[in-house]
Image (spheres, helix red, strand yellow):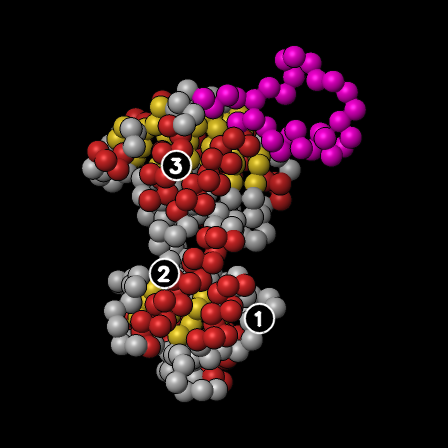
């Protein structure tokens, strides 16, 4: 391999345009046919003396793995906004920089949140199942009725970039938007939404609730029986953030007993192996953690990760660094 080009190892195959740039500007092994785990990434990095690792959640670098990062590595560039799979503080303590890919996936994640809201409210999973079984009969006027989302009250838990983008979209449906955040945003970032300081006060006012906050020890299991019981009966619950936010026993019970009319999930606790009880629920619409899964967004994510590698190699500041 040429020593004049940055040496990288990637844990996953990236979109076509990103792979073309890698071939042109970087020294790297061929793209993996299947996502590589942490050990495989480290092994390749040792073999190639890689200066940067491009990783996703498939190759977590936490706990004991941090000490095993090959000495040649100067940058861990995660092709994601989320950092759940990295111990940033420990990695940086080894003198290794960390970067992520903020902003570029905001719009696609907000689009998916709206898809989940609509699918859960309009019983898309049940309608699709009926058609796939052959349909076969006319539905009665009062049968399998969903919820109209127009003019309903939407609660957004976590008003970061994605939460704000969801609020903008909700305005097109004439929805009243409330949000709970650690602090109130500047008015120009609220997009007509109203800040509610206490989550407990907001929940009873929301026919639809959607989560847009990071997973952490502090937020683990925050959606529990008490949380769900504060919602109006027959509410819609959506999570396109992190699976660990939800106590799935409580969610399953709420979907079974009618406290929730439906739910839309893009994430779960045990990815990629959801609790089988979730999959049995007719009123659950679920997608496989694909919030950023468009050609445009995944390409921008990969390009931003490479921009960080190029900056590191040129001795310039990272484009999107992550501080400890």
Looking at the rendered structure, which numbered label has been put on residue 166?
A: 3
Image position, residue 199 (x, y; %): 31, 32
Quadrant of the rendered image containing residue 169: top left
Q: Residues within 10 Å of mark 2 (few under 14, many from 20)?
A: many
Image position, residue 144 (x, y; %): 63, 21
Image position, residue 116 (x, y; %): 51, 36
> Looking at this view, is 277 or 125 the one in front?
125
- Look at mark 2 in the image and give the residue it sits on: 100
Total marks in image: 3
Q: CA distance from mark 1 to mark 3?
A: 34 Å
> Looking at this view, is 180 or 321 the one in front?
321
Q: Is residue 102 magenta?
A: no
Residue drawn at x 59%, y 52% as measured from the top left: 273
Q: Earlier in the sequence, mark 1 or mark 2?
A: 1
Image position, residue 55 (x, y; %): 45, 66
- Look at mark 1 in the image and give the residue it sits on: 32
Q: Is residue 54 visible?
A: yes
């Amino acid at each position: 391999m040429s020593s004049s080009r940055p040496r990288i190892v990637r844990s996953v195959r990236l979109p076509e345009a990103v792979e073309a740039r890698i071939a042109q500007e970087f020294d790297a092994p061929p793209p993996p046919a299947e996502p590589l785990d942490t050990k495989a990434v480290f092994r390749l990095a040792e073999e190639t003396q890689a200066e940067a690792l491009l990783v996703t959640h498939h190759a977590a670098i936490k706990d004991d793995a941090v000490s095993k990062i090959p000495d040649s590595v100067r940058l861990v560039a995660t092709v994601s906004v989320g950092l759940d799979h990295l111990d940033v503080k420990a990695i940086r303590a080894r003198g290794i920089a960390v970067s992520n890919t903020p902003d570029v996936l905001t719009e696609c994640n907000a689009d998916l949140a709206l898809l989940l809201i609509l699918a859960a409210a309009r019983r898309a999973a049940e309608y699709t199942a009926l058609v796939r079984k052959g349909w076969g009969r006319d539905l009665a006027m009062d049968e399998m009725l969903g919820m109209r989302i127009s003019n309903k009250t939407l609660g957004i838990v976590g008003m970061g970039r994605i939460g704000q983008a969801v609020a903008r979209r909700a305005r097109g449906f004439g929805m009243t938007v409330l949000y709970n955040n650690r602090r109130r945003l500047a008015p120009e970032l609220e997009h007509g939404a109203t800040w509610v300081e206490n989550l407990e006060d907001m929940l009873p006012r929301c026919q639809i609730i959607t989560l847009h906050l990071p997973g952490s020890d502090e937020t683990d299991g925050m959606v529990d029986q008490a949380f769900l019981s504060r919602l109006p009966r027959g509410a819609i619950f959506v999570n396109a953030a992190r699976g660990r936010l939800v106590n799935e026993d409580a969610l399953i019970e709420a979907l079974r007993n009618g406290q929730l009319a439906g739910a839309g999930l893009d994430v779960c606790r045990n990815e990629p192996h959801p609790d089988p009880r979730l999959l049995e629920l007719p009123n659950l619409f679920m997608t496989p953690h694909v919030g950023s899964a468009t050609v445009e967004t995944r390409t921008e994510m990969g390009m931003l990760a490479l921009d960080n590698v190029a900056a590191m190699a040129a001795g310039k500041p990272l484009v999107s660094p992550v501080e400890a």
